[in-house]
Image: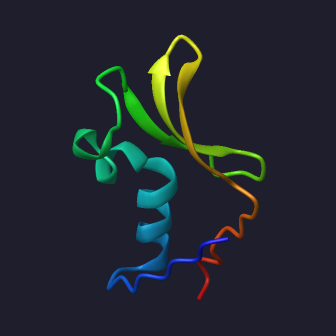
Amino acid sequence: MIKIEIPIDARLMDVWACLAEETNEWWGPKHYTSSHTKKMELQDYIGGKLMEDFGNREGIVWADIIGVKTPDYSC
């Protein structure tokens, strides 16, 4: 297993929204492995995938989501 930690100077709720809802904005075409890639997708639930979506149920899986803890925005 690989664990990566990167400190980010931003509000927790903004970082989570960017990671989980705007994946294609920060992991864009310059990181794609194929000219067929339509978008990068992060399925933010256990059993989900981080993947390049080619459309038509095709693509490349980069990672399996094995744990999710949605941030507590009250802090």
Relative vertical location of residue 65 with respect to residue 1 in this rendering, above or below: above
Q: Nearer the viewer, residue 45 or 3?
A: 3
Q: In the displayed image of the protein, which residue is found farthest to the top?
A: 56
- Rendered view: 8 above or below 32: below
- Residue at x 52%, y 54% (from the top left corner): 20
Going by the image, does 36 lie left or right of 19? Answer: left
Which residue is at a point 55% across and 19% down the rendered structure image? 58
**Dividing the image into 4 quarters, which one contains the C terminus?**
bottom right
Of 38 and 34, the residue lying toward us:
34
Tell me residue 47's x, y (percent): 77, 47
Rendering coords of residue 10 (x, y %):
35, 80
Question: Which quadrant is home to the N terminus?
Answer: bottom right
Image-based side of 14 in relation to 50, left or right: left
The residue located at (29%, 46%) in the rendering is: 31
* Residue at horizontal 34 percent and vertical 50 percent from the top: 27
* Colour setup of the view: rainbow
Q: Is residue 18 left or right of residue 25?
A: right
- Residue 2 x, y percent position in the rendering: 60, 72
Q: Position of residue 16 (x, y in %)?
A: 50, 66
Q: Residue 72: which quarter of the image?
A: bottom right
Residue 25 lies, with reference to residue 60, above or below; the image says below
Q: Is residue 72 left or right of residue 10?
A: right
- The tally of labels here is 0
